[in-house]
């Protein structure tokens, strides 16, 4: 009886050993390149270096266009445990369509934008959920501290901080400088990004205008007054 048990036990051990050897051969020899590429995709991510636009000043050095640092959220579909649950939670907090978010989180690839340049309060609420596969990137949002003052001169930018009107457009390549390129980041087993200390920002050139904030405010106020008084279409 003991002899049969020993034979069965030895057979099971040999069988398990053979299975392990075959699996190792599959990983290390036959499909080595495929698993290597998969490991690289999981451990290394590529992020573009963000170029912050330079500040626009009036002739006395008063700020007319600056940057606000806000956080954007992205998803890594491969790291998601439950895209449905994640989409539901994010939809409630961001006000976006749950179906649209789920479609993004169910796509192929390792990076999808979920929401750009969030309100700080919303960003903190999402962070507190610690959702797996959801990450944060700081981005600059263009802000004009004087409101609409000289807006027809200063212009505006789009969601990617590229100039589309006025000075922002005319001198876009100087204010934005050149693209910063890309940085490779390693991730640990949980997907958390390592090497957080790397500076991935570059800043464009500042511009000093010849206009004076105070005089511009007076001129615009008088023009608005005249337009209202004479029912003018433009001034």
Image (cartoon, grey):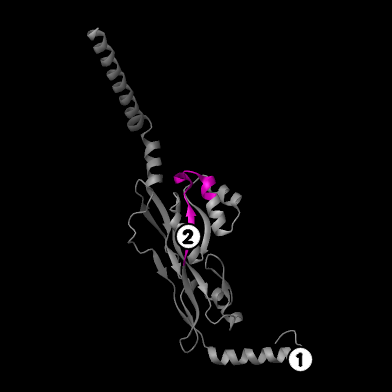
Rendered image: mark on residue 109: none
- Residue 88, compared with residue 233, is above or below; it is above
Does the CB distance between marks 1 and 2 fall below 8 Å? no
Label 1 element class:
helix
- Residue 114 visible somewhere in the drawing: yes
Who's the residue at 44% across and 45% down the image? 79
Question: Which quadrant is the N terminus positioned in?
Answer: top left
Whole-percent x, y for residue 43 in the image: 37, 47
Question: Which quadrant is the C terminus positioned in?
Answer: bottom right
Please tell me how crowded label 2 is: few (under 14), some (14-19), or many (20+) other residues with Cα within 10 Å.
few
Question: Which image quadrant for residue 218?
Answer: bottom right
Mark whose residue sits in front, 1 or 2: 2
**Residue 195 colored magenta?**
no
Label 2 element class:
helix
Q: Which residues are magenta?
A: 70-87
Who's the residue at 75% across and 84% down the image? 233
Who's the residue at 44% across and 57% down the image? 128
Name of the residue lying farthest toward the top: 1
- Comes first in the chain, label 1 or label 2: 2
| Residue with the mark numbered 1 | 230
> 221 or 153, which lies in front?
221
**Residue 83 colored magenta?**
yes
Q: Is residue 158 left or right of residue 140?
A: right
Rendered image: mark on residue 125: 2
Whole-percent x, y for residue 29 in the image: 33, 30
Query: Alpha carbon of mark 1 to alpha carbon of mark 2: how far?
Result: 51 Å
């Amino acid at each position: 009886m003991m002899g049969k048990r020993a034979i069965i036990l030895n057979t099971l051990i040999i069988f398990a050993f053979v299975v392990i050897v075959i699996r190792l051969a599959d990983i290390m020899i036959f499909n080595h390149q495929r698993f290597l590429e998969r490991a690289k995709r999981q451990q290394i991510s590529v992020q573009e270096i963000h170029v912050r636009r330079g500040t626009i000043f009036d002739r006395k050095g008063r700020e007319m266009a600056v940057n606000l640092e806000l956080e954007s959220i992205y998803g890594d579909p491969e790291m998601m445990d439950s895209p449905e649950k994640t989409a539901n939670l994010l939809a409630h907090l961001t006000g976006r369509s749950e179906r649209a978010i789920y479609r993004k989180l169910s796509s192929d690839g390792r990076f999808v934008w979920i929401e750009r340049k969030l309100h700080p309060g919303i960003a903190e609420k999402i962070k507190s959920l610690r959702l797996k596969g959801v990450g944060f990137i700081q981005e600059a949002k263009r802000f004009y501290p004087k409101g609409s003052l000289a807006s027809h001169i200063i212009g505006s930018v789009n969601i990617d901080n590229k100039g589309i009107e006025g000075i922002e457009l005319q001198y876009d390549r100087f204010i934005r400088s050149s693209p910063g390129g890309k940085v490779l980041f390693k991730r640990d087993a949980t997907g958390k990004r390592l090497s957080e200390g790397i500076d991935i920002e570059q800043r464009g050139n500042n511009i000093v205008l010849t206009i004076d904030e105070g005089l511009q405010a007076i001129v615009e106020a008088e023009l608005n007054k005249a337009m209202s008084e004479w029912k003018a279409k433009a001034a």
